Amino acid sequence: MIHQHIGLRTIKTGIAVTLAVFIAYLLKLKYPFFVGITTIISMDKTVVNTFKLGRNRIYGTILGAIIGTIMALIEPGNPLLCGLGVILLITTCNKLGIQSGISVGGIVILAIMVHTKENIYLYAINRTLDTFIGASIAFIVNISIFPYYNFHRIQQKVESVKQAMDSFIDHLEENNQAINLPNLQKDLLEAKEFLHLYKNEILLSRKKETTIQLEEDLNRLQDILTQYHILQTIHKEKHPSVFAYHKETIYQQYLQLKK
């Protein structure tokens, strides 16, 4: 039997959808589906990403509602106008940098054009309200229930790379292939991504000095790997001074790393 771990994001998404549908019923909204689906597609790993996704999907819904209403006023249900409306939506969202709003905006256009028999103005307003409620619930749940905090994971990843670098430096004189560069580069990129997420997260008390130190360590580790790649391309016997320079640069960066 395979045991699969259920992640915190999965649990939070389930809680958010439960709240979304419950609130939709409580407010007697006609289409709880739209509230729930917006909640699902707005939930992300971090609070800041959830906020951005929700915001962009609200913008996308507003654009979709405006475009769908205009097209429906011309001729409801016209297939050509449906396609032209979606093209206009995608082009506008791309220009505004809100690509994550395209999907929900497109759904709103099609819903207005081919699905609704209600007053199109009222329907457009209601879809915008549904999206706002769904995105807001996703944000509130994400920020209230164990918001993403990866500081210790960053520290662990940086220490792991440092330990691999210790082994590399110990054997550099004897063997220029002492470490597995692809794996080390992968670990380094992961650590940088974790740090980026941490620095951009909102409503977290960041340890500024420690964060700066970690960033400096990651930059030095990257410099060492870059110098090592260069070293691998230099013929030691033909260019001894150049080889020695890059090797010394590696040692100096490593010494700075150990301080």
Image: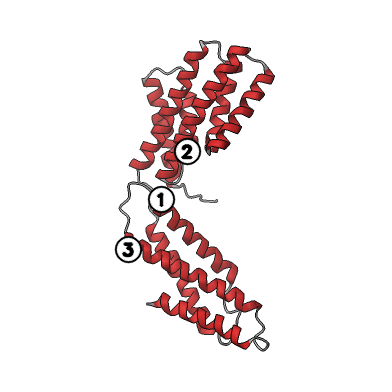
Q: Quadrant of residue 216?
A: bottom left
Q: Which disc number belongs to residue 30?
A: none
Q: Residue at x 48, y 56 (%)?
A: 193
Q: Is residue 196 left or right of residue 247?
A: left
- Report the side of 60 relative to 143 (left or right): right
Viewer-nearest of discs 3 and 2: 3
Q: Is residue 14 above or below residue 83?
A: below
Q: Amino acid at mark 2?
A: Leu
Count up the numbered dots. Answer: 3
Which residue is label 3 attached to?
Answer: 209
Q: Is disc 2 surrounded by few (<14), some (14 to 19) or many (20+) residues within 10 Å?
A: many
> Marks 1 and 2, how far apart in space?
14 Å
Whichever of callouts 1 and 2 sits on the residue coming sooner in the sequence is 2
Are the residues at dot 1 and dot 2 in contact (C-beta closer than 8 Å)? Answer: no
> Along the polypeptide, which appears first: circle 1 or circle 3?
1
- Horizontal and vertical percent position of residue 200: 41, 50
Residue that mark 1 sits on: 200
Mark 1 Cα-neighbour bin, 10 Å: few <14, some 14–19, many ≥20:
few
Residue at the spot x=58%, y=27% of the render?
106
Work out how far the residue at label 3 is from the one at label 2, CA to CA, in angstroms: 30 Å
Do the numbered discs 3 and 2 sit on residues whose CB atoms are within 8 Å?
no
Indicate the quadrant containing the C terminus: top left, top right, bottom left or bottom right: bottom left
Element at label 1? helix
Q: Which residue is mark 2?
A: 53
Q: Residue 51: x percent and y percent?
A: 42, 39
Location of residue 19 in the rendering, given as x and y in whole percent from the top left corner: 38, 30
| Tag 2 secondary structure | helix
Where residue 91 appears, as percent x and y from the top left, is: 60, 33
Residue pictured at 60% horizontal, 73% vertical? 229
Instruction: Say whether residue 146 is left or right of residue 30.
Output: left
187 is higher (above) or lower (below) than 68: below
Rendering quarter of residue 178: bottom right
